[in-house]
Image (spheres, helix red, strand yellow):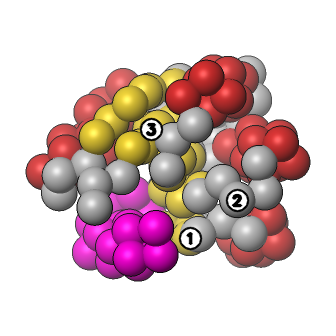
Amino acid sequence: MAMRVLVVDDSGFMRKRIIEELRSQGHAIIGEARSGIEAIELYRALKPDLVTMDITMRDMDGITAAKQIMGEDPKANILFLTILNDEKYKTEAERLGAKGFINKTDTPSITRIIRELEQKQ
């Protein structure tokens, strides 16, 4: 079953790359956000099945946005995609209940986690 996905990244290039990969797997991209603030607003409006979330963004970082989203909807599926390999962010993501903390270039892991989430729907 295709997932309805909100893609959150402050880099237009990375959003495009993530979107292309997800669409190639048959998923529907229902929104794009450039900041944590936009992510929260779009999550409320669109109620996606999955949010791919960057960590470092202007205005509001991904961890803060995820806390807000999950505070409002504890069943939210958030997958952190980042270039950072920082244990403190990974630990915080796990504590929040994120579905994963993956390098943006690790397409096989991204695909695997999304398939696991699809099977649970």
Residue at horizontal 41 percent and vertical 43 percent from the top: 5
Residue at horizontal 78 percent and vertical 57 percent from the top: 74
Q: Are marks 2 and 3 in contact (CB under 8 Å)?
A: no
Q: Between disc 1 and disc 3, whose residue precedes? A: 3
Residue at horizontal 77 percent and vertical 48 percent from the top: 73
Calculate the distance from the C-alpha at mark 1 to the C-alpha at mark 3: 15 Å
Depth order, front residue of 1/117: 1
Chain part drawn in magenta: 103-121
Q: Is residue 75 left or right of residue 48?
A: right
Q: Is residue 79 left or right of residue 86?
A: left
Q: Is residue 99 left or right of residue 4?
A: right
* 4, above or below 84, in the image: above
Residue type, numbered disc 1: Gly
Query: Which type of secondary structure does the marked residue at label 2 adopt?
Result: loop
Report the mark closest to the observer, 1 or 2.
Answer: 2
Quick check: can you spot residue 39? no
- Residue that mark 2 sits on: 75
- Dot 1, crowdedness within 10 Å: few (<14), some or many (≥20)? some
Q: Between disc 1 and disc 2, whose residue precedes? A: 2
* 116, above or below 17, in the image: below
Residue 45 percent across, percent down from the top left? 61, 23
Query: Which type of secondary structure does the marked residue at label 3 adopt?
Result: strand
Residue 3 percent across, percent down from the top left? 36, 52
Residue 30 percent across, percent down from the top left? 38, 30
- Residue that mark 3 sits on: 7
Q: Between disc 2 and disc 3, whose residue precedes? A: 3
Residue type, numbered disc 3: Val
Report the mark closest to the observer, 2 or 3.
Answer: 2
Depth order, front residue of 102/33: 33
- Residue that mark 1 sits on: 100
